Image: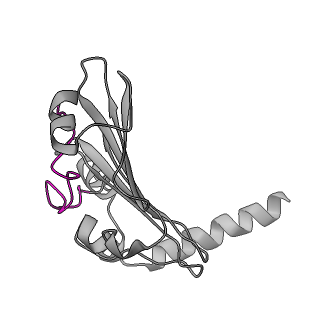
Amino acid sequence: MLDYRFSILVIFLVISALVPSAQRARPLSAAEIYAVSIPAPTPGPLHPPYSSYKNVSIGMTADETRSKLGAPTETSDEQDYFKFSETETSQVYYDAAHKVTAITVTYTGKLDLAPTPKAIFGADAEVKPDGGIFKMVKYPKAGFWISYNKTGGDDPLIIIAIQKM
């Protein structure tokens, strides 16, 4: 076994000696390793095209939300439930200070009134073979993320969520 390892070492040293020194790679500095291993942030918009629902956005008070959306179907200190039609509902979630921390909108049945991923993100999303779609994008500078989820199948539904980060 020792002879085998020794033979490999000799072959490696001979090959190394044959390669001209100008072609040998120099070791990378710490700054070069850091620059290679840490990708730069992807530039993008500060706010997506869709950053509020019916003029309700993250950080608004419960009173402001209710003045824009009307009286909730169900209400509590933590969330309000709104039913706008048989095909469109929304839930708005509040923190202890009664400010909006998340908004979900659900579209069922006839989906032609629901926004498309392009309307939400400014770009299309990949459609799965069953017709389903899922896309989530974080907007750290805006302080929230948005997700778009369309179920597959014959009777799909769409849920759009905006949530404070």
Main SS of the magenta part reads: loop
- Examine the rendered structure and indicate whether residue 91 appears above or below residue 7: above
Residue 160, image quadrant? bottom left
Q: Pick whichever, 149 or 17, lies toward us.
A: 149
* Point 61% across, 75% down: residue: 153
Image position of 121 (left or right of 108): left
Q: Pick whichever, 5 or 143, lies toward us.
A: 143
- Examine the rendered structure and indicate whether residue 146 appears above or below residue 130: above
Residue 5, image quadrant? bottom right
The quarter of the rendered structure image containing the C terminus is top left
- Examine the rendered structure and indicate whether residue 161 appears above or below residue 94: below
* Point 27% across, 65% down: residue: 120
Q: Is residue 15 visible?
A: yes
Asked if residue 59 lies in the magenta stretch, the reply is: yes
Asked if residue 164 lies in the magenta stretch, the reply is: no
x, y percent for residue 49: 17, 63
Image position of 107 (left or right of 102): right
x, y percent for residue 141: 17, 45
Residue 61, image quadrant? top left
Image position of 91 (left or right of 65): right
* Point 32% across, 77% down: residue: 124
Q: Pick whichever, 154 or 102, lies toward us.
A: 154
Residue pushed farthest top? Answer: 96
Count every numbered label the image shows and give the total.
0
Span highlighted in magenta in the image: 40-60
* Point 50% across, 65% down: residue: 157
x, y percent for residue 130: 59, 79
